[in-house]
């Protein structure tokens, strides 16, 4: 209540507290081991001030709250100004100005976080929940599609690890809809796929004896199947966790995060790790790359993708685990990155049942 009272008394125009704080509080009590205020990175305060759209207005509001309660990690954002910086931060086309706090809350990333509360001067609590409270109270992590792309949602889920932090929370995935974005030939996903396919052709041209190819996150098979249609002699292992996508492509529906399917297949000459490292934890990324030498032949090639600056860390991990870099693509106008690495010396196979990674905060043990 102290946070709500501080926001009320600060006098910011139409100010509400919401997003992660509300979700963490509710899910910590219902699905975790209690709410721990010390774990919060910030307390999000959304206010609406169409008179001043400058970044300085956000800073001034944040500083006013800090002066009143210095121990709280405040972050105040003027929702009336979101359209002035949204495309720069998240990419894509410019967005329309938001019309109100309720309009703003309706764009927040998940339905369970699209909730805000405030305290009035009579100490009555007001709730703003454009999608209702069912997902928040029922423990359902569900993407809000209004402004959040499936790709960005996957990245958030990998960072937030909801199923790990709050056992019992249901994570609703939409891998099929995410793959539908490939229908746009100019989308970042389609551009990334074209580069992956180019690198796959080059790897096959360099090694005419290659017969074993693994795709760790094959999706609908679109990265690989069109290329292999003209390359007889290769029997690929295409793994996909989503059963509908696996059915579409005729791939194997299996948990790609454990070693069993790879060990049963044999060491790969070419391995695709596209759509993996951006959706798992940093520890899982490290563990997976450290395991790959035991799943591949000496001289085998890995083609991988990752969004944003974290790709530099992935490059360092490959270099530190016996791989040499053959290529790296970093478009100036998109966030995706594609790397190609060759394994110098194969390593011992990992044990059966070892987990390398888990999507969206699954059990990483």
Image (cartoon, grey):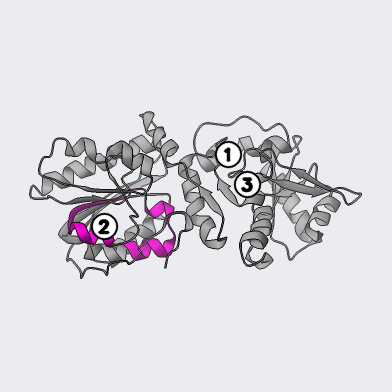
State yes or no: residue 263 in magenta: yes
- In the figure, residue 6 lies in which quadrant? bottom right
Indicate which disc residue 261 carries: 2
Which residue lies under the disc numbered 3? 135
Front-lying residue, 66 or 28 = 28
CA separation, marks 1 and 3?
A: 26 Å
- In the figure, residue 50 lies in which quadrant? top right
Q: Quadrant of the N terminus?
A: bottom right
State yes or no: residue 197 in magenta: no
Q: Residue 228, position in %: x, y?
A: 17, 39
Front-lying residue, 267 or 3 = 267
Q: Tell me the element at label 1.
A: helix
Q: Residue at x 76, y 38 (%)?
A: 49
Q: Is residue 232 left or right of residue 29?
A: left
Q: Residue furthest right?
A: 122
Q: Quadrant of the C terminus?
A: bottom left
Q: Residues within 10 Å of mark 1 (few under 14, many from 20)?
A: some
Q: Which residues are magenta?
A: 260-288
Which residue lies under the disc numbered 1? 86
Q: Are marks 1 and 3 in contact (CB under 8 Å)?
A: no
Q: Are marks 1 and 2 in contact (CB under 8 Å)?
A: no
Q: Residue 19, position in %: x, y?
A: 66, 49
Along the polypeptide, which appears first: circle 3 or circle 2? 3
Q: Residue 328, position in %: x, y?
A: 29, 49
Residue 161 in view (yes/no):
no
């Amino acid at each position: 209540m102290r946070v709500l009272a501080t926001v009320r008394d600060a006098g910011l125009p139409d100010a509400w507290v919401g997003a992660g704080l509300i979700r963490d509080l509710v899910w910590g009590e219902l699905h975790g081991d209690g709410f721990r205020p010390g774990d919060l990175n910030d307390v999000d305060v959304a206010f609406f001030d169409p008179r001043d759209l400058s970044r300085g207005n956000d800073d001034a509001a944040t500083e006013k709250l800090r002066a009143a309660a210095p121990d709280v990690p405040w972050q105040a954002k003027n929702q009336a100004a979101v359209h002035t910086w949204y495309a720069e931060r998240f990419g894509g086309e410019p967005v329309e100005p938001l019309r109100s706090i309720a309009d703003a809350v309706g764009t927040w990333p998940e339905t369970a976080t699209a909730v805000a509360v405030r305290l009035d001067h009579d100490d009555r609590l007001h709730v703003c929940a454009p999608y209702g409270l069912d997902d928040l109270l029922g423990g359902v992590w569900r993407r809000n599609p209004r402004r959040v792309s499936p790709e960005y949602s996957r990245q958030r889920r990998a960072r937030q690890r909801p199923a790990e932090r709050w056992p019992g929370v249901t994570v609703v995935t939409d891998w099929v809809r995410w793959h539908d974005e490939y229908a746009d030939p100019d989308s970042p996903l389609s551009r990334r796929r074209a580069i992956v396919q180019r690198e796959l052709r080059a790897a096959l041209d360099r090694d005419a004896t290659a017969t074993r190819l693994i795709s760790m996150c094959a999706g609908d098979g679109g990265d690989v199947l069109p290329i292999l249609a003209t390359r007889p002699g290769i029997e690929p292992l295409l793994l996909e966790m989503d059963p509908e996508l696996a059915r579409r492509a005729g791939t194997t529906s299996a948990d790609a995060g454990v070693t069993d399917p790879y060990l049963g297949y044999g060491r790969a000459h070419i391995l695709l790790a596209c759509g993996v490292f951006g959706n798992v934890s940093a520890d899982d990324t490290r563990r997976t790359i450290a395991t790959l030498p035991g799943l591949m032949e000496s001289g085998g090639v890995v083609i991988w993708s990752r969004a944003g600056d974290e790709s530099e860390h992935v490059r360092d991990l490959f270099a530190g685990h016996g791989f040499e870099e053959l290529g790296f693509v970093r478009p100036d106008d998109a966030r995706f990155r594609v790397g190609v690495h060759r394994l110098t010396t194969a390593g011992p196979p990992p044990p059966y049942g070892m987990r390398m990674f888990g999507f969206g905060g699954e059990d990483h043990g």
